[in-house]
Image: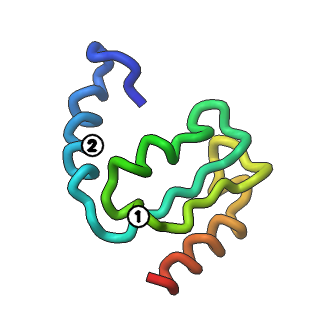
Amino acid sequence: MPTSADDPAHDANTKAWEVLRRFDRPFLCAFSDGDAITKGGERAFIGQVPGAEGQPHTTIEGGGHFLQEDKGEELGRVIADFIASS
């Protein structure tokens, strides 16, 4: 997550956001409540990624930065339910 224009990842991140702002297919946000880096990160996507509108975004409790490792089964259920409903 680049924090300045000098960050080596800045240009790639800017290009990614150009694509995301046009992405109109279903887009699910699933973040952890215990990640000091990305907690609340869904706010960056909701309202900017068209496909995120009206989706069942989820905050999984008790996970950390590596949510797939900390709460893999719960994250897997969230993703499977999302796919099944899309």
Residue at (55, 67) in percent of width and height: 56
Disc ID at residue 27: 1
Residue at (57, 57) in percent of width and height: 30
In the image as oriented, which residue stretches furthest toward the top?
A: 6
**Mark 1 closeness class: few <14, some 14–19, many ≥20 residues within 10 Å:** many
Quadrant of the frame with the N terminus: top left
Residue that label 2 marks: 17
Give coordinates of residue 4: x percent, y percent: 34, 16
In the image as oriented, which residue stretches furthest toward the right?
A: 62
- Dot 2 and dot 1 residues touching (CB under 8 Å): no
Q: Is residue 50 above or below residue 33?
A: below
Chain-order first, disc 2 or disc 1: 2
Residue at (73, 49) in percent of width and height: 63
In the image as oriented, which residue stretches furthest toward the bottom?
A: 84
Quadrant of the frame with the C terminus: bottom left
Give coordinates of residue 17: x percent, y percent: 27, 43
Going by the numbered disc 1, the residue's amino acid type is Phe
Residue 72 lies left or right of residue 16; in this view the side is: right
Residue 16 lies left or right of residue 84; in this view the side is: left
